[in-house]
Image (cartoon, rainbow, N blue to C red):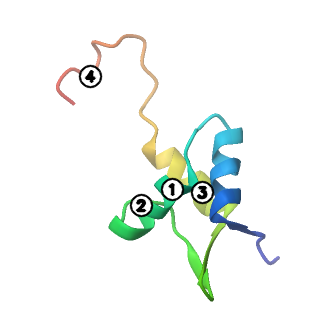
Amino acid sequence: MTPEYLTRPEAAAYLTARGLPISKCTLQKYATIGGGPLYRRFGTRALYTATDLDTWAESKLSAPRTSTSECQGV
């Protein structure tokens, strides 16, 4: 099955709707400096898949915590 591709504004809206607020400008910054979700180019547009966005977002989340003191110095 061919994945659905999301433009950068759509990708930002996708993540934000899932409780992970991010702007299209931040995704642009990550595309420039690295560290962001995987994307593909189609002409001048960056395109993302929901799977790649979900994988990236999960990698950015910390483990569950019960206290702010659990990970001192990390």
Distance of label 4 from label 1 (alpha carbons): 30 Å
Horizontal and vertical percent position of residue 40: 58, 78
Instruction: Give me the residue at 60% from left, 57% from top.
Output: 53
- Residue 53 badge: 3
Task: Identify the mark nearer the N-term, 2 or 3.
Answer: 2
Q: Are circles 2 and 4 on residues that touch, CB within 8 Å?
A: no
Q: Quadrant of the N terminus?
A: bottom right
Helix, strand or loop at mark 3: helix
Helix, strand or loop at mark 4: loop
- Residue 71 badge: 4
Type of residue at label 1? Cys
Specify whether 12 is left or right of 60: right
Query: Is residue 40 placed above or below 67 in the rendered structure?
Result: below
Helix, strand or loop at mark 2: helix
Q: Residues within 10 Å of mark 1 (few under 14, many from 20)?
A: few
Q: Quadrant of residue 39?
A: bottom right
